[in-house]
Amino acid sequence: MAALAVSLGDPAGIGPEIIAESWARRHDMALAPFFVLGGAGVLAEAAGARGLAVEIQRIEAPSQAARVFENALPVLGQEDCDAIPGNPDDQGAALAMHSLAEATRHALLGTASAVVTAPIAKAQLARVGFEYPGQTEFLADVCGLEREDAVMMLAGPSLRAVPLTVHCALADVPTRLTQSLIEHRARIVAQALARDLGITSPRLAVCGLNPHAGEGGRFGDEEARIIEPAIEALSAEGLRITGPHPADALFTPRARQTYDVALAMYHDQALVPLKALDFDEGVNVTLGLPIVRTSPDHGTAFDIAGKSLAHPGAMIAALKLAGDMATRRASHG
C-alpha cells in the first residue's frame, strides 16, 4: 500500500510540530509510513524548537517514502518558507494551499493511499485565493462532487458525530435543513461506515434541532415538518435510524452505547460534545469521497505554536485512522 500524504497546514501554526512529533512516535504508535508535501525547512525548525531529533529527508517520488520513513521524515517538493510560529502571513498561507493541493493530487492519482491534512487558517488562506469555507468543501470540488456529497464526520474513542449543516451562520440552519439533505447525507454516512470502518449495519441517531426536540411543536416545527419524515423514509429503506432525539440527552454515556454515529443538525451541536469528550484524539473524517481524508479535529492554535505545548494526539489519531481506512479500502478493492 502507498504511503499517506500529509499536508503541512499553516506553517505558523502547530501543524508542523505535531507532524514532526507524530513521526518521532511512529514506532510506539505503529503509524503507517507517510510523507509531507513541502516545508522541509519549516518542519526542521519546528522539530528543533520542540527538542525532537527528527531527520528530514527530501524525496523525489512518493514511492520512496516507505523506505525513507524508518530513519527520516520524508518530504516531497522543494516549496518552503520562513515561518514565525504564531505569526501567519501570505507566504505561509500560499505554502499551506500548495501543500494541500499536492497531497490531494497524490491521493487522487493513487500515489498516496490517503491524505491527512494539518490545520489551516481559513481567513489567511482566503487572502491568497482559497475560495472555500473549509478543506471539506475544497476536497469535494477537486474530487468532482457536489458539496453536499462530502460529509464531515468527527470521530473519537467515545463518539462519532456528523453535522448535517456545517460552515454557515446559526441563523441560516433552519433554511438549509431539508428532508432531502438529511436523507442524502444519512445514506452517505451509513455506506461509509460499512465500507471504511467495517460497521456492517450502522446505527444512526438523529438529533432534533430545537430544545427538547421541539417539545411536540411548542419550541419549533422542524422536527415534525423535516426531521421525522426523513427518519421515516430512511427507516423504510432499511437503515437502522432513530430520532429525533433531544440533543442535550443524546451524548450521555448511556445514550452513546445505543448508536454508532450521531447526526447533528448544525456545526456546534456535533463538535461541542466531540471536543469535550475526545479533544486530544478527535479526528475530522470526510465521508463520501473517492479518496480517504482525515485531519486532526482542532485548529492552527497560533497562540501556542512553537511553545512545545501542542498535544500530538489528534494528529496521531488522524494518521492511524487514515491508515486503517486505506487498508480496508485496499483489501476490498
Image (tube, rainbow, N blue to C red):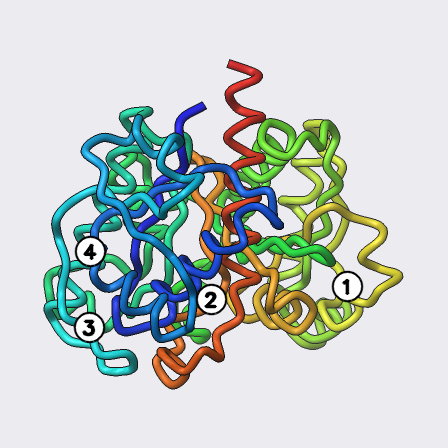
Q: Secondary structure at mark 2?
A: helix
Residue carrying label 2: 173
Q: Hey, which quadrant is residue 161 in on the image? A: bottom right
Answer few, some or many: residues within 10 Å of disc 1's Cα (few below 14, many 20 plus, some between 14 and 19).
many
In the figure, 89 relative to 138: above or below? below
Residue 82 versus residue 204: which sits nearer the camera? 82
Can you tell which of label 1 and label 3 is closer to the viewer? 3
Q: Is residue 144 left or right of residue 266?
A: left
Q: Measuring from the top left, give residue 260's x and y in whole percent.
A: 73, 46
Amino acid identity at mark 2:
Val
- Distance in Å between CA atoms under marks 4 and 1: 37 Å
Task: Give the residue at x 76% y 65%.
Answer: 251
- Distance in Å between CA atoms under marks 4 and 3: 15 Å
Q: Measuring from the top left, give residue 158's x and y in whole percent.
A: 74, 58
Residue carrying label 1: 250
- Distance in Å between CA atoms under marks 1 and 2: 20 Å
Residue 70 versus residue 150: which sits nearer the camera? 70
Q: Earlier in the sequence, mark 4 or mark 3?
A: 3
Amino acid identity at mark 4:
Met
- Distance in Å between CA atoms under marks 1 and 3: 43 Å
Task: Give the residue at x 46% y 47%.
Answer: 294
Residue 309 versus residue 111: which sits nearer the camera? 309
Q: For the N terminus, give its image quadrant.
A: top left
- Distance in Å between CA atoms under marks 3 and 2: 37 Å
